[in-house]
């Protein structure tokens, strides 16, 4: 069975992500550099850790990606999966939560059971704070999430498969403190710096040079020179898209009958 073949039907709440577009344009931000130097390096050399397995020492396998939306958390997961040549699965955390006693924990367990019998993969828990929120109170919902977290850690403590677990959140303050304390590597994905924005602009002005790039590159660089940045990498990309679409539109003939 190939690494990209699904062994059986996906459990509820789990989807297989398609390979990301435009991954070559990712800026080598500080978190991306850590991924290269630590995560990819360790996962590409599993033999170095084989003698240590008896001591419960493994390559880093749990990551926390946090920061405002639109700054590359999902793209980083797609990039990791691409570099490791493994599939990426997304856990839609909000769909796993149920009011009935024990159902949330059962849903989490079903996903981990499925993954345990699957080839190597990256597993992204998207908006993980909805599944494992900061604890407080004794409501039935709180008991459900506590039970789900207990199931998660019981499985992870005995995990032997080659799977990378990534927790992603826009609101790290809402995430359970105990969960955060047990995740090996925390990486913050923030808005682009001036230099990072210039690198992205330079990349796309070369790729899309025939779509008015000389003009819109100057406009965007002038904006940065004036100290006006971008709220997110997504905001920057959408701005570039807008210039390209306008260039194409300006070149279209009249549609009048």
Image (spheres, rainbow, N blue to C red):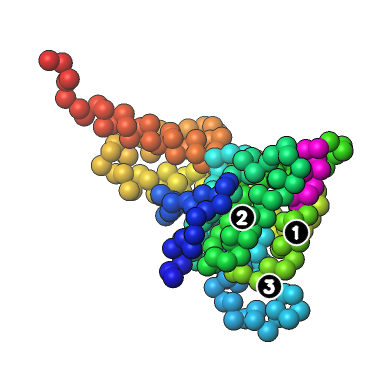
Secondary element type, mark 2 = helix
Q: Residue at x 43, y 51 (%)?
A: 18
Assign the C terminus to one quadrant of the image. top left
Mark number displayed over residue 153 = 1
Of all residues, the one furthest to the top in this rendering is 257
Q: Is residue 92 visible?
A: yes
Q: Main secondary structure of the magenta part?
A: helix
Mark toward the start of the polypeptide (3 vs 1): 3
The residue nearer to you, when weighing 131 against 212, is 131
Query: Picture coordinates of residue 24 (x, y %)?
Result: 42, 55
Is 2 placed left or right of 74 in the picture? Answer: left
Of all residues, the one furthest to the left in this rendering is 257
Residues in magenta, as a range: 140-149
Is 180 placed left or right of 6 in the picture? Answer: right
Residue identifier under label 3: 58
Identify whether 148 is placed above or below 164: above
Q: Are marks 2 and 3 in contact (CB under 8 Å)?
A: no
Neighbour tally class for label 1: few under 14, some 14-19, many 20 plus, Cα within 10 Å: few
Q: Residue at x 62, y 50 (%)?
A: 125
Query: Picture coordinates of residue 156 (x, y %)?
Result: 71, 63
Q: Is residue 141 magenta?
A: yes
Residue identifier under label 2: 111
Mark toward the start of the polypeptide (2 vs 3): 3
What whole-number distance in Å separates the C-alpha atoms at marks 2 and 3? 22 Å
Judged by depth in the image, the label closer to the viewer, 2 or 3, is 2
Mark toward the start of the polypeptide (2 vs 1): 2
């Amino acid at each position: 069975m190939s690494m990209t073949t699904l062994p059986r039907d996906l459990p509820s709440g789990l989807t297989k992500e398609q390979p990301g577009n435009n991954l070559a344009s990712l800026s080598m931000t500080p978190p991306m550099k850590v991924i290269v130097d630590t995560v990819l390096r360790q996962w590409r050399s599993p033999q170095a850790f084989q003698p240590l397995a008896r001591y419960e020492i493994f390559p880093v396998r749990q990551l926390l990606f946090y920061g405002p939306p639109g700054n590359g958390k999902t793209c980083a997961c797609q990039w990791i999966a691409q570099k490791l040549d493994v599939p990426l699965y997304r856990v839609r955390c909000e769909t796993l939560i149920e009011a009935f006693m024990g159902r949330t924990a059962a849903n989490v367990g079903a996903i981990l059971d499925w993954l345990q019998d699957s080839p190597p993969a990256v597993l992204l828990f998207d908006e993980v704070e909805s599944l494992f929120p900061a604890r407080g109170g004794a409501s039935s919902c709180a008991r459900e999430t506590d039970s789900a977290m207990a199931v998660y850690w019981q499985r992870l403590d005995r995990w032997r498969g080659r799977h990378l677990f990534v927790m992603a959140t826009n609101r790290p303050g809402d995430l359970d403190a105990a969960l955060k304390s047990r995740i090996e590597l925390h990486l913050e994905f923030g808005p682009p710096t001036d230099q990072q924005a210039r690198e992205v602009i330079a990349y796309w002005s070369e790729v899309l040079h025939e779509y008015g790039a000389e003009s819109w590159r100057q406009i965007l660089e002038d904006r940065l020179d004036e100290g006006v940045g971008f709220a997110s990498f997504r905001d920057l990309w959408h701005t570039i898209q807008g210039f390209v679409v306008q260039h194409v539109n300006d070149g279209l003939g009249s549609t009048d009958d």
